[in-house]
Image (spheres, helix red, strand yellow):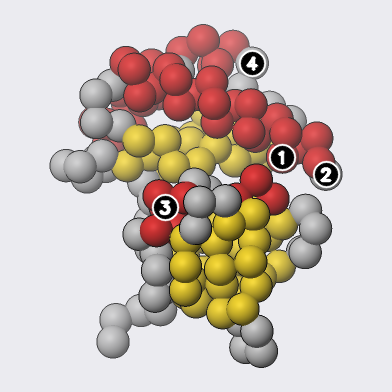
Amino acid sequence: MASVYEKERELQREVSRTLESGLPGVEVLAVELSGPERFTVFVDHPKGVDHALCQRVTDALGDYLRTYSVDVSSPGMERPLRRREHFRNAVGRRVALRTQERRRVRGEVVEAGARTVTVHTENENVEVPYDAIVRGNLIDEGTK
């Protein structure tokens, strides 16, 4: 399984460089493999994500279309979280994390430090290094 996550991280770096330099304002939140020849790119933009932006992202990733089927998505309600700044914006919110060491962590983000995120689970505060996170998402709590 580690090789899948390593490939996702490699794709994340490549796709981020391509999109963030070629499409001003586009932020690549996550790249997730959904098969050996398919991946999804989750993007955000200060003006929001619409079909036209998704098409521009797809066009900018044309080189990948020779090898992969590429899906482009907005962040949605369960926004992907991977980097420190993502977790900093999620303090006080509930998240679900999957790590290589500790399979699943669910709880409220209480701190986004320099190297780790602290999540309050039912029983304890758990510090998770950002480098260990292979998947992270907000938990959709609906409207209150």
Q: For marks 3 and 4, give the CA distance.
A: 29 Å
Q: Which residue lies at the image location 35% right of the left edge and 35% below the top edge?
A: 27
Amino acid type at mark 1: Tyr
Q: For marks 4 and 2, give the CA distance.
A: 21 Å
Residue 78 seen from this side = no
Front one among 27 and 72:
27
Instruction: Please provide percent x and percent y for residue 60.
Output: 38, 16
- Of pointers 4 and 2, the one earlier in the residue sequence: 2
Front one among 119 and 13:
119
Toward which corner of the image does residue 39 lie, by quadrant?
top right
Toward which corner of the image does residue 20 lie, by quadrant?
top left
Toward which corner of the image does residue 59 lie, by quadrant?
top left
Q: Secondary structure at mark 1?
A: helix
- Of pointers 1 and 4, the one earlier in the residue sequence: 1
Instruction: Please provide percent x and percent y for residue 23.
Output: 28, 21
Q: For marks 1 and 2, give the CA distance.
A: 7 Å
Between disc 4 and disc 2, the foreground one is: 2
Tell me if mark 1 has few (under 14), some (14-19) or many (20+) residues whose alpha carbon lies within 10 angstroms of its own: some
Between disc 3 and disc 2, the foreground one is: 3
Residue 96, above or below 129: below
Between disc 3 and disc 1, the foreground one is: 3
On residue 5, which mark appears? 1
In the picture, which quadrant includes the C terminus? bottom left
Q: Which residue lies at the image location 80% right of the left edge and 58% below the top edge?
A: 101
Residue that mark 3 sits on: 86
